[in-house]
Image (cartoon, rainbow, N blue to C red):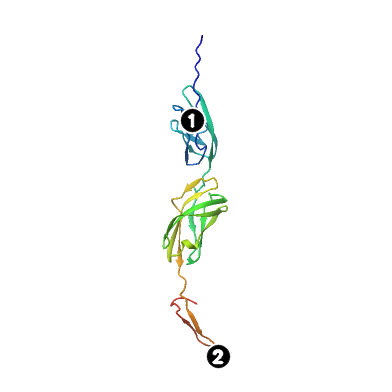
Amino acid sequence: THPIVVNTTPGTIAGIPSVCTGATTTLTNATSGGTWTSSNISIATVGSATGVVSGVAAGVCNITYTLGGGCNTSISVTVNASPNVSVFYPPTTTSICVGAGNTITVNSPSLGAATYTASYDLSGANTSTGNTATLVMGSSTGTFAIPSGLLTGIGATTTTITTITNSLGCVSTLTTSNTATFNVNALPSVYTVSGGGSYCTGGAGVHVLLSGSQTGVNY
C-alpha cells in the first residue's frame, strides 16, 4: 500500500482586485499559513505574508496564494494608472471683482487630455478647504471654475490644488508648483448722478455731479 496525502486547497481570495499605481489594496484568504506571490512584479507587487498589493504600472497580473502543500488559488488584479503629474507648472489666473467667480488655468503637459476632478483649498481673503471642481484638460492646459460663493472676501486669495483624480478614481497628490494668487477687488460705491442738461454747440458744456463717488476711481 502507498499512503496518499490530500493537501488542503485554499479558499477563494477576497478583497478588491483593482488598485491604482502608487496605491495599495489588501487581499485575504480564510485559510491561513499561505504565501502570496505576483505573476508580474513590474505591474504589481504583493507582500508575501500580508497580501497587500501595491500598484506599480498599469496592466493586469495574477496574484496567487499558495499553501505549504503546494495547492493554490489565484485572482486577476487590474492596476489602473494614476494621473501623471510628473510635469506640473504653477497654475495661472486673473484678478476679479467681488461677486464674480474665477477661472484657474492648469498647466501640465504630462497630465493628458481628459476630464478630471481637481481638489483645491483657498486661503487669504477667502478661506475654504476640500473644494472640488471639474477640470477639463487639453493637450497641455485646462481650466476649472471657482464659484462666486467662495469668493466673497476682498483681497488677495491663494488657490492651492491638492489632488487630481481621474475617471477611474485614481488620485495623484500635488505638493509643489500648485498655487495661484489673485485679487478679489471691491466694487465702487453706489453714487447719485445729478446736473447735466442741454447746451449749445461750441458752448462750455454743463456740469455732471456724482454724489457719493470715490476719490481715485475712474467713472
Residue type at mark 2: give it. Answer: Gly
Q: Looking at the image, which residue sits at the far top?
A: 1
Q: How many numbered discs?
A: 2
- How far, Cα to Cα, is label 2 from label 1? 95 Å
Identify which residue is drawn at 52% across, 28% down.
Answer: 73
Where on the picture, by quarter, is residue 202? bottom right
Q: Which of label 2 and label 1 is nearer to you?
A: 1
Residue 44 pos. (x, y %): 50, 36
Residue 216 pos. (x, y %): 44, 76
165 lies above or below 199 = above
Residue 217 pos. (x, y %): 46, 76
Identify which residue is drawn at 53% across, 30% down.
Answer: 74
Q: Name the residue under label 1.
A: 37
Q: What element carries label 2?
A: loop
Q: What element carries label 1?
A: strand
Q: Residue 203 carries which label?
A: 2
Residue 147 pos. (x, y %): 50, 61
17 lies above or below 31 = below
Residue type at mark 1: give it. Answer: Thr
Q: Do the residues labelled 2 and 1 touch (CB within 8 Å)?
A: no
- Nearest the viewer among 123 and 109 is 123
Q: Which mark is residue 147?
A: none
Q: Looking at the image, which residue sits at the far left?
A: 124
Pointer 2: residues within 10 angstroms few (<14), some, or many (20+)?
few
Pointer 1: residues within 10 angstroms few (<14), some, or many (20+)?
many
Q: Earlier in the sequence, mark 2 or mark 1?
A: 1
